[in-house]
Amino acid sequence: MKGEKRDIDLWSQIKKGDVHAYHELYDRYINVLFTFGMQYTNDETLVQDAIHDIFVDLHRYRNTIASDVVVKSYLFTSLRNDIFKKLKSQTKIVHLDIVSEGSYKTDSAEDELIFSETTLNKNASLALALSSLTPKQRNALHLRFSEDLSYEEISSTLEISLESCRTLIYRSLKELRAKL
């Protein structure tokens, strides 16, 4: 992160009222927060509103926010809680959309057709296996492998103990392997 500020440094500057730090943190996390939020609902507008609400609240309450936080975990937890609050008020069902895309170069149309059929079958198998997991298991796997969060950050985000977090991910992977 040469030349790039650490999250906690941005956080400290936000607490002091630095608007540039606020914008930098927003730009750094907008895409991953959106992807994370789309796990809970397929309503893009709701997710965007929830993200914006988090950052508006962060700016509004900058004087009273804690100084010693894991910023990424804080943002993910805040987003999840805000989405749940919005969904509950709208009495919507939470959906997890599983989208997987890959790119592959081929030399012939036949190779491309074989590859796309194989990929489609693998994606369908994976989607079916993932859909058989609980939402908590899917969420934990997403945080671990898509968002590259540590076990400590995941346990904080999911509000479970570190040992439970490790067990949850281990059992989820074991279940996936068995189904695939």
Image (cartoon, helix red, strand yellow):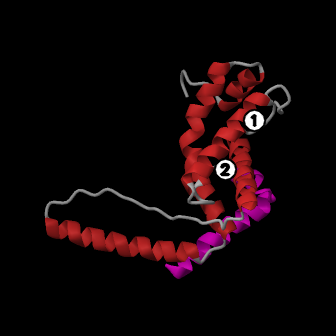
Looking at the image, do the residues carrying marks 2 and 1 touch, with CB atoms under 8 Å apart?
Answer: no
90, above or below 76, in the image: below
Count all numbered tags in the image, as a single digit: 2
* Residue annotated with mark 1: 57
Residue for point 58% across, 65% down: 96
Residue 138 quadrant = bottom right
- Residue type at mark 1: give it: Asp
Q: Dot 2 corresponds to which residue?
A: 150
Q: CA distance from mark 2 to mark 1?
A: 26 Å
Q: Is residue 168 magenta?
A: yes
Residue 154 x, y percent position in the rendering: 70, 54
Quarter residue 38 falls in: bottom right
For the residue pair 96 and 180, the one nearer the viewer reads as 96
Viewer-proximal residue, 53 or 62? 53
The residue positioned 61% from the left and 50% from the top of the image is 47
Q: Is residue 56 in view from this perspective?
A: yes
